[in-house]
Image (spheres, helix red, strand yellow):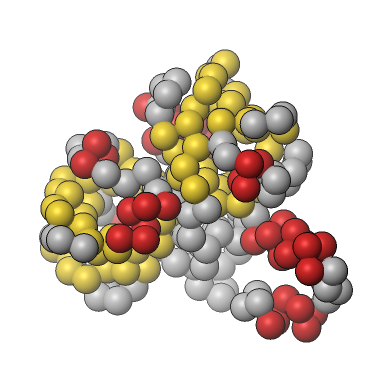
Amino acid sequence: MFTGISEELGKVISFKNMGRHVEIEIECEKVLENTKIGDSIMTDGVCLTVKEINDNSYKADIMEESLKMTKFDISILNKKVNLERAMRLSDRLDGHIVQGHVDGVGKIKKIVENVFTIECNDYIQNLVVKKGSISLDGISLTVSGDNFNNFSVSLIPETFYKTNFKYKKVGDKINIETDIIQRFIQKSITKKERLDKNFLLENGF
């Protein structure tokens, strides 16, 4: 689990096709502190397992399913990515509960000062709620506007300047993870089940 609060910006320095998966290497500093092989680091919204640690980078594998569900392809090489280590039970939850399991890819439709409008598919749009939480490239944000096939988020200056949003432009792809609570509610409504403690426990919450 993660909070959606980026700890630092890393840089993708290698993206190697290994057949049925890709090996990615991220240049970074802070997230390497107290990190060991097998730990998780959320990389632009995707939970990756560290398989190798170097002086100023880590390597991880991205499996075929993750490649299909995310924006990750060779175009990410040399790009800046948001990084966050998995949260500890003693940590404050400053953002919201983020799993690092991307629901799909959106596209930036419009940028007006600090407001970003994101196009997305129907599945994601049905899980977007105005004033609710959403994770974009691993960053916990609040939905400020909700339309037919797009939604908007407003970034405070602190978030804008400390994340890779300061580099984004119209047309860029972005990893989207909807709020886990909203997904549980949607499933409860669809199956006409009661949303209670037992339901949440049965579904891994």
Is 98 left, or right, of 82 in this rendering?
A: right
Q: Position of residue 205 (x, y in %)?
A: 65, 75
Look at the picture and state if 13 lies above or below 182: above
- Residue at the location (26% across, 40% down)? 76
For residue 156, say whether it is visible: no
Is 23 left, or right, of 172 in this rendering?
A: left
For residue 14, say whether it is visible: yes
- Residue at the location (70% across, 81% down)? 201
The image quarter in which residue 110 lies: top right
Q: Nearer the viewer, residue 63 or 196?
A: 63
Q: Position of residue 168 (x, y in %)?
A: 41, 27
The image quarter in which residue 189 lies: bottom right
- Residue at the location (32% across, 46% down)? 72
Q: Position of residue 164 (x, y in %)?
A: 39, 35
- Residue at the location (30% across, 39% down)? 80
Total labels: the figure holds 0
